[in-house]
Image (cartoon, grey):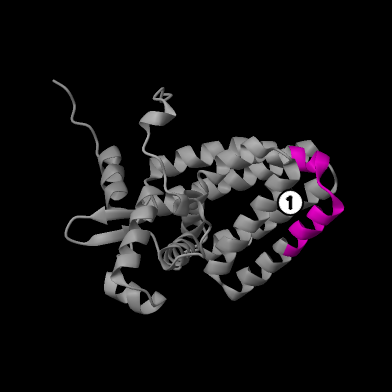
Amino acid sequence: MTDHRSFASIAPIERDDLKVVPDTVRNQAYEKLRRAIVTGYFLPGQRLVERELCEMIGVSRTSIREAARTLEAEKLIVIVPYRGPCVATLTAEEATQIYEVRRVLEGLAAQRAAELATDLEIEMMDRIVRSFDKAVAARNLHALVDLAGQFYDTLLRASRNDVARDLLSSLNARISLLRATSMADPKRTAHSAAEMRSILEAVRAHDPAAAVLACTIHVRNAAAAAREHLLKSGPENRKATRSAKRPRRASN
């Protein structure tokens, strides 16, 4: 809803508030924690112990608490009673919804990238896929999640569709969480590498239909892997699964 108050009714900011200042310790703590979560260094459901984070990052408790509040707003951290801050764990249903959005928007991006990508962008994607292959061989989960993000960011830039890119950016943190979940299985990472290569080759061939198909297959397979993992690992999801499988009592 638009706020129709006049500017005069809004408290004015001070002149000093307009000045650009160097990055604060809190912002650096936030960036470090966010990256550690979205690249899978801290796993879904893992408890974040304040004292350990202070020692690890080298900042005060205040900085950690402020960073945690920002990450909570991004839905990367949840505050669990009697446990404190923990890395957010997505439910299977939430994951399904996110992958449905990904399938549509990234399929569109792949189509447009196949039509518009430059030789330089294609070369960048090729380098990322080759690095991804090396990370698969090394079983480096952090690198895998990071490189998958780079691949899709390059694909989106090549699509020249800023709206699709902005929409996916709003989900980026939770998408990275799901990547860490699906890629925890070594078998899935090998399939991911082949699927990303198929997307790349379709874009290189400037074949929009093949690019959409390759992207759709990749997202659907990632969704299936993430959903399977979430149903097996999450206590709430396990409970829901047991309830769904429990035979219904016959009515009289």
Q: Is residue 104 left or right of residue 115?
A: left
Label 1 sits on residue: 198
Residue 121 in picture, x, y percent from top left: 79, 53
Residue 4 in picture, x, y percent from top left: 41, 22
Towards the viewer: 176 or 221: 176
Majority secondary structure of magenta residues = helix
* Residue 191 in view in this figure: no
43 over 54 or under it: above or below: above
Q: Is residue 36 magenta?
A: no
Towards the viewer: 79 or 100: 79
Residue drawn at x 22%, y 32% as measured from the top left: 248
* Residue 22 in view in this figure: yes
Residue drawn at x 16%, y 60% as measured from the top left: 82
Residue type, label 1: Ser
Residue drawn at x 58%, y 68% as measured from the top left: 143
For the C terminus, the image quarter is: top left
Q: Is residue 119 magenta?
A: yes
203 over 146 or under it: above or below: above
Judging from the image, what secondary structure is the residue with disc 1 in?
A: helix
The quarter of the displayed image where residue 57 is located: bottom left
The quarter of the displayed image where residue 149 is located: bottom right
Residue farthest toward the top in the current orientation of the protein = 252
Residue drawn at x 73%, y 49% as measured from the top left: 199
Residue farthest toward the left in the current orientation of the protein = 252
> Which stretch did the figure color magenta?
112-127
